[in-house]
Amino acid sequence: MSFKKYDKGVNHPPSFKRMIIMSYKQSADYLKDKVLPDTKIAIVIGSGLSSIIDNIEGKQVISYADIPGFVKSTAPTHKGEMVIGELFGQPIICMNGRVHFYEGYDMSEITNYIKTLKLLGVETLILTNASGSMKQELEPGSLVVIEDHLNLSGRNPLIGTNDDAMGPRFVDMSNAYSKELIEKVMDGNEDVLTKGTYVFTTGPSFETPAEIRAYRMLGGDIVGMSTVPEAIMGAFCGLNTLAISCVSNYGTGIPGSNVSDEELVRVTGLSQKRFVRVIQQLFEKI
């Protein structure tokens, strides 16, 4: 059976799950001669933040569809391509777009590429996304460094057969978001960055006003539909992970709320210059 042709939404047998989980090795074998030597950093580009790719030199672009073991991204603004090159003097792998759980894939499928990155030598993983603010003071356009998360999806990418060669069965999440990287990215950027807790929901529907109130009571600052599965897999693989979120809108029920995909793209577009500058300054420190 080809993993590319299975029916989404079906409860597949353990043998199928094992095939999906191990497919990251096929991806690494395909990519190992294409990445630049000594590539230690990978960055995942979230909704509306792709202008940073303009700064990559010597670009080599590979569609996810051409990489064995990768799944296709169908979300708006997510191109679904890997960009290899140099960013601010550092060899890099840039994931231009991600695959979300709400697109119908298994949780292990949408995070398998993290294992591929580890096999390719990546040590630092930078995750980015767009999110909704649950606090009036976190205005659209704000850049938030994620220091912790609440996984309210009821799902975890590590459920199923464990690959002991990649990571432990039970993963310590106390430093899922690297305190060292948070300190480095915040240094000198206190005027443009704030720290916060990210709430992960599956989507694709946006949150109700009652849900926003509940998430805020639980300690959440921003909410979105990505990043946490990848952060969990990053912790499993022993990667140093940093996550930066661009607030694209207020959550439903908060004064000034305008929840739409179009508004997301508009607001994140206005924040891209600040985002690129933050990444450039970080690259000078790592």
Image: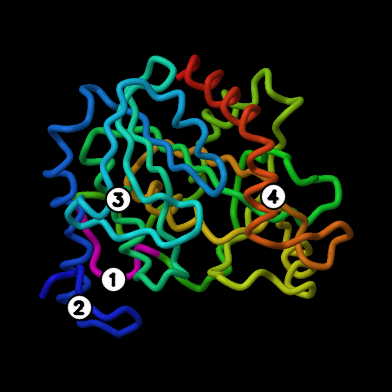
Q: Which residue is mark 1?
A: 160
Q: Earlier in the sequence, mark 4 or mark 1?
A: 1
Point 69% across, 47% down: residue: 247
Q: Earlier in the sequence, mark 4 or mark 3?
A: 3
Residue type for callout 2: Pro
**In the image shown, does 211 or 239 lie closer to the viewer?**
211
Q: Separation of disc 4 and disc 3 at Cα?
A: 26 Å
Q: Nearer the viewer, mark 4 or mark 3?
A: 4
The magenta segment is 157-164
Q: Separation of disc 3 and disc 1 at Cα?
A: 17 Å
Residue type for callout 4: Ser
Pointer 4 with pointer 1, Cβ within 8 A: no
Q: Earlier in the sequence, mark 4 or mark 2?
A: 2
Q: Which residue is mark 4?
A: 248
Residue neighbourhood size for the residue with mark 3, other residues' Cα within 10 Å, grouped as few (<14), some (14–19), many (≥20): many
Q: How does the figure colour the protein chain or chains?
A: rainbow
